Amino acid sequence: MSKKVNTPNKKIFCFLDFTLSLVALAAMVLFLLPGPVSAALVKQTDQISNESVYNPKPDQYDISLPMPCGLSMVFRLVAIPISGKLRDMKTFLGSDDDSDYGYLDRRHLAYLGSPLSVDNLPEPQREIARAFLGNLISDQVYLMGKYEVTKAQWDSVMSGTCSEITQESARPQADISWYETMNFTAKYMQWLLAEHPETLPAFEAQSEAIGLVRLPTEDEWEYAAMGGQFISSDALRTNTFFEMEDGRQERDYGLFQTPSRNPESESGAIGRWRPNPLGLFDTAGNVAEMTFSPFRMTVEGRLHGSVGGFVRKGGGYLDAITLVRPGKRTETAFFYAQGPTSAIDLGFRLVVSAVNTAGVERVAALRGEWEKIVPPAPAQVEPAQTDEQLSLSVNVEGLSTLQKVDALIKATSDPELREHYASLRSEITDATLVSAWQNEDLIRDSLRRLIYGVYAIYTTDSRISSLRKSYQDIQSEVQRYQHLLNEASAQERAELEKVIAENNKRMSNFSGQIMEFDENIANLFNYYLFLLEDLKKFDSQDKQKVNSIMLFLKQDIKGDNLYSQAIFNAYRQVSRDIGKMRVGQVSEINLKNLLDNAK
């Protein structure tokens, strides 16, 4: 029996004997080697690659800046869907939490912008950015750290020496104060300027103007954490978490406390969980993150005027899921009684931005956009000595209101009048700016109402179709029951007549609902025609502006779900009808064609 079992496994036993001999020999060699050498060999088993501590999940759209010790800091491009350099994106950030602590993180009005454009990036980064954007148009961008800054990255900048890379090196740097983080960004910038200035964003005609690394503002952080350009404005205002992949749960995207997960006593290595739609890792949990923004409470849908500590975002591994949502915001003091504040679950990530007025060409571009709204003063006008001379010397023909006031300021020699005109000019300037921005907002709102108006028509028609189908199904049932009446017994007839009566009542209700929805859809279409007619005044003033805003609205339609598909169909319908309106074919815009295009 023994021989029968062992014979087929002779090779295995020979292999095991050989392996055990090698292990014994290796142990003897280690024992005979000097202490430091053998210790170094043992420690090698704890080492990992350099890339795993700064980019464990590489991607073709990563943008990297070099670091000391052969490391890198990896970023993702964040695009703000704004046309122009003076405008900013109006949105609502924060949380819809209606608890007693709503004054801490209630949704509030926010404005997001950036001084950088893709053209400011170095050429290699520019190519990656354009490929990442695809057909998306954005005049304002910034770079957000793909991961939280790790211990290895921190040591490479702060210690001035290159430490050994181990498993510990891949964890986020935590237990540091906000001021130490500021020191890190300053030292890192100095190293980049000395060693690799060509990797920073730049501005033509002014070599001193460069991009910079810093902590993100709260608004920059939250917009990127929600998914940036990959999330629609509607989802940004309403979602509590960023959009997840099918079949995934919130716990798949970060380390935090949940009933189904055993509490962990420390943070995890970067890139261990899944990324958000923008490709950022660990924006939910692992370690919470510092921002550049001072904390202000939220009241009346805005930020309160009282400034306190700094805003902490993202939550950490010690927090519950309610604190790791992108909209949640908590305050951390810069100092407590024992000194600068730090925490074992608080780290940071970096952003690449610049100064708003950096570079000659940026100042010129800002000035150009400003003068489109606020025209420059006319040519020098000789000062007049009398009111009569003033009226004769100022030629206001063809001038804007502001230019007329500027001409009066230059022409009058009366100090009081000059002061009065200057005050008037300031008021007109403010009104002109407000009017210009409001005009764009009115166009955007008008176009959005048109798109959602078509969507409402689609959904109403779908509801009518469903009601008609239900009506026809019941009608068929009634006809079948009536056919059975001829052969039914008295008792059966009574039951059938009761069922027929109930179904007739249901048919009557459906008929009433169909009539009501038919009336609703007619009213919706008439309102749609009214909105198109109302759009004419904007379109006649600036067709290019209408086209530009339509393009940005198209870019805002995200997702491949049924809702997004319906909104996109509505967008295409509005685009077609605007084209018909422009060539005088309004009579061809009718409800039948609109509904046929939806199918």
Image: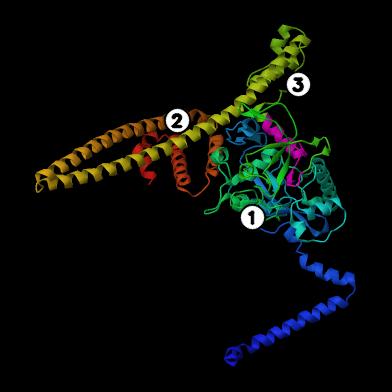
Q: Is residue 134 magenta?
A: no
What secondary structure is found at the residue carrying circle 1?
loop
| Residue drawn at (75%, 17%) of the image | 410
- Amino acid type assigned to the residue bearing label 2 in the image: Leu
User: Which label sits on residue 380?
Assistant: 3
- Is 373 located above or below residue 424 in the figure? below
Q: Which label's residue is closer to the chain start, 3 or 1?
A: 1
Q: Position of residue 549 (x, y in %)?
A: 55, 37
Q: Position of residue 38 (x, y in %)?
A: 85, 72
User: Which label sits on residue 317?
Assistant: none
- Amino acid type assigned to the residue bearing label 3 in the image: Gln
Say which residue label 2 marks: 531
Q: Residues within 10 Å of mark 2 (few under 14, many from 20)?
A: some
Q: CA distance from mark 2 to mark 3?
A: 46 Å
Q: Residues within 10 Å of mark 1 (few under 14, many from 20)?
A: some
Q: Are marks 3 and 1 in contact (CB under 8 Å)?
A: no
What secondary structure is found at the residue carrying circle 2?
helix
Q: CA distance from mark 2 to mark 1?
A: 47 Å
Q: Name which quarter of the figure residue 545 lies in.
A: top right
Q: Position of residue 500 (x, y in %)?
A: 18, 41
Which numbered mark, 2 or 1, is in the foreground of this view? 1
> Can I make out residue 137 in this image?
no
Q: Which residues are magenta?
A: 343-370
- Amino acid type assigned to the residue bearing label 1 in the image: Trp
**As drawn, which residue projects farthest toward the right?**
34
Say which residue label 1 marks: 273
Q: Quadrant where the N terminus lies? A: bottom right
The one nearer the camera, 98 or 392, is 98
